[in-house]
Amino acid sequence: MDLGNCRAIVTGGASGLGAATAAHFREQGAQVVVLDRAASDDAHHLQADVTSADSAAAAIAQAVRIMGGIDICVNCAGVVIGEKTVGRNGPHDLDAFRRVIEVNLIGSFNVLRLAAAEMARNGRAENGVIVNTASVAAFDGQKGQAAYAASKAGIAGMTLPLARDLAGLNIRVCAIAPGIFATPMLRGLPQDVQDGLAAEVTFPARLGDPQEFARMAAHIVQNGYLNGEVIRLDGALRMR
């Protein structure tokens, strides 16, 4: 699929990996509508709650009105918490666990199901591409990451079934499992903490650049034989 002729929605596109992806796609000539709860200076930014069926449906409908349709859906909206199953204050807060699952996993599925229904109307040999954001935590999550790892393992686990479900509609589905990236959240940590995280990466020993995530998303769109795959993008990081 040629990015220059595509219409894309990017959730979580107001910052971090989503913002880098939206900017890169536009540089390649794509039309892009950003969906995010946060405010943004983006001219084509729609405030939406990905966990709400009504809010997501309204945003998708507005995106279709703006662009005339949808060819690409990239889900980057997500939240993270750090909390042990049993900590100093007792058992893990259930509402916090539920919130991470709702945003990261259910939110991604909510948006992609609506986007896929729009893609199916395109009537082409390739109607669309969906790219979800998993994480290396899906495979080797650390302590305090039960909620986050579970949500991202769900993203990884549904990749192949989604690809099989949507094959008859000529829609491909992949996921990217990023390692430690220089997002605003990580850049807010003390420099020595950032350096320690970077040192854990096998090679190159640095934080990932959000542009590298964006280029991987673009490659998935452009490589028509990529389907049903979860691609680690982590410099061979294996968390302990």
Image (tube, rainbow, N blue to C red):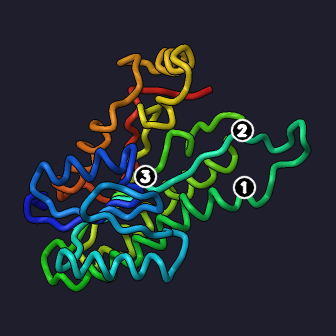
Residue identifier under label 2: 144
Tell me which corner region of the image, top left, top right, bottom left or bottom right, holds residue 225. bottom left
Residue at 52% from the left image edge and 28% from the top image edge? 238
- Identify residue type, mark 2: Gly
Q: Earlier in the sequence, mark 1 or mark 3?
A: 1
Tell me which corner region of the image, top left, top right, bottom left or bottom right, holds residue 169. bottom left
Q: Secondary structure at mark 2?
A: loop
Residue at 78% from the left image edge and 40% from the top image edge? 84
232 with respect to 196 (left or right): left
111 with respect to 138 (left or right): left
Q: Earlier in the sequence, mark 2 or mark 1?
A: 1
**Residue 51 against residue 235 in the figure, above or below:** below
Q: In which quadrant will I find the N terminus?
A: bottom left
Q: Which numbered marker is on residue 21?
A: none
Q: Secondary structure at mark 1?
A: helix
Q: Residues within 10 Å of mark 1 (few under 14, many from 20)?
A: some
Mark 3 to mark 2 CA distance (whole Å)? 20 Å
Asked whether residue 18 is in view, the answer is yes
